Structures are given as C-alpha cells and as structure tokens.
Amino acid sequence: MIGSSLVTGLRAARSSVVFTRNLAAAPKAVDPIQQLFLDKIREYKQKSSGGKLVDPSPSIERELKTELEKLERQYGGGSGVDMTAFPSFKFDEPKLDPIDEQAPQK
C-alpha cells in the first residue's frame, strides 16, 4: 500500500519536472491557438498606427460621427474648438463697497 502510493507520487513528480522543462525550453508559442493570437496582435499593431480606427465600416464611421456631434452639442464644442484642451478660466476681481476707515463717533 505504501509502495504503490510512493510509485504514483514518483510518477507524478517525474512528469511535472519534464513538463516544466519543456515549457522553459520553448521560447515560442507551441500551442497553435496562442500563435494565432500573437499573429493577430502583431497585425493589429501594424494597422493601428496613427490613432485611427482599424478597418472601420461605413456604418461605424457614421455612428462615430453622430456620437461626436452629440458630445459637441452637449458640452459646447463646435468647429474649431479643441475639446481635448484644458479649459481656460478667467476670474474678474469683485467690486467691493468702499469702507469708511474712520471709526464711528460715539
């Protein structure tokens, strides 16, 4: 009984060591699904330069334009207004009533 559990434990330890060694020896993705994922990531990186949408359809472009127009109406943007710039604030000096510097006479 102890012998059989010892043998199964050794088999498990031996297979885990071999499995770990094989993973460390393979720098590239061995799994075809992982390789496909990496290829698609690289392809997307090449297409996404410039900060624009990647392969947009005409309906997606129309939807984007509609949403941007909604934002312009809602937040006061328009043609020639940079909505990404930090707003500039102007605070006018408040007008104060003149104060009589003399103490009231009693």
Image (cartoon, helix red, strand yellow):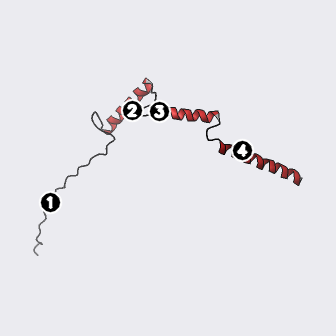
Judged by depth in the image, the label closer to the viewer, 3 or 1, is 3
Mark 4 and mark 1: span between their CA atoms? Answer: 85 Å
Label located before the other in sequence (2 or 4): 4
Amino acid at dot 3 = Gln
Which residue in the structure is indicated by mark 3?
A: 46
Look at the numbered discs 2 and 4 and tell me whether their residues touch, using CB distance below 8 Å: no
Name the residue rendered at 52%, 34% in the picture. Answer: 42
Judged by depth in the image, the label closer to the viewer, 2 or 3, is 3
Residue 97: mark: 1
Amino acid at dot 2 = Glu
Provide the secondary structure element on which disc 4 rests: helix
Label located before the other in sequence (3 or 4): 4
Amino acid at dot 4 = Phe
Residue 19: mark: 4
Judged by depth in the image, the label closer to the viewer, 2 or 1, is 2
Mark 2 and mark 4: span between their CA atoms? Answer: 52 Å
Above or below, 7 against 43 in this view is below
Mark 2 and mark 3: span between their CA atoms? Answer: 27 Å
Look at the numbered discs 2 and 1 and tell me whether their residues touch, using CB distance below 8 Å: no
Please tell me in which quadrant of the rendered image residue 66 appears: top left
Residue 67: mark: 2
Label located before the other in sequence (3 or 1): 3
Provide the secondary structure element on which disc 2 rests: helix
Mark 2 and mark 1: span between their CA atoms? Answer: 49 Å
Relative to the observer, which residue lies in front, 39 or 53?
A: 39
Specify the quadrant that holds the C terminus: bottom left
Residue reaching furthest right? 1
Provide the secondary structure element on which disc 3 rests: helix
Judged by depth in the image, the label closer to the viewer, 2 or 4, is 4
Provide the secondary structure element on which disc 1 rests: loop
